[in-house]
Image (cartoon, rainbow, N blue to C red):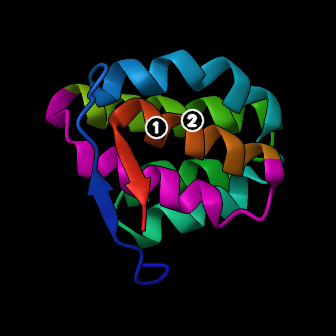
Amino acid sequence: LFGNTSHTKLDTESSSPYDILKRHTSELLGVISGPDKLANDLSSVDLLSDHVKDDVLTTLVISRYQKCSILLNEIHRSLKVFNERERLISFCDVLKQQNDWTLSRISDDMMKELGVTEV
């Protein structure tokens, strides 16, 4: 993983990890500027299959928006199947590592909606 970040669960939980990501998808699609880097980073923490990563990295005829859509659809799919809080927390941690203020803010917002705060 990207560091030793610990998290504490707060008393409030609003909705499922899937629903939280779904609410933020449109904004994420608009601000992810490096889908290739994000694909590599998601793959390195086992949030993205090698097949999807390879599709994003090797397909030359798709736009940045389409690449981002593929990545977010894969995260949605995994959250719908597993619905694990830790999976969304890991995704938020990867977003924070992208060195982008807007992605960091979205990550913080999703973490708050999960009822989690970084320590």
Is 100 or 114 nearer to us in this picture? 114
Residue 112 circle label: 1
Q: Quadrant of the N terminus?
A: bottom left
Expressed as whole percent of the image width and height from the top left, the position of residue 51 reads 42, 53
**Which range is magenta?**
81-101
Furthest residue in direction front, as rendered = 11
Secondary structure at numbered mark 1 = helix
What kind of element bears circle 2?
helix
Instruction: Please give the name of the residue rendered at 68% of the width and 32% of the height, measured from the top-left corner.
Output: 28
The residue depicted at 44 percent of the width and 72 percent of the height is 44
User: At 68% from the left edge and 38% from the top edge, which residue is drawn?
Assistant: 67
**90 in the magenta segment:** yes
Q: Position of residue 46 (x, y in %)?
A: 33, 64
**Residue plotted at (67% across, 18% down):** 26
Is disc 1 in contact with disc 2, using a CB cutoff of under 8 Å? yes
21 relative to 49, above or below: above
Q: Hey, what amino acid is under mark 2?
A: Asp
48 magenta-colored: no
Disc sitting over residue 109 in the figure: 2
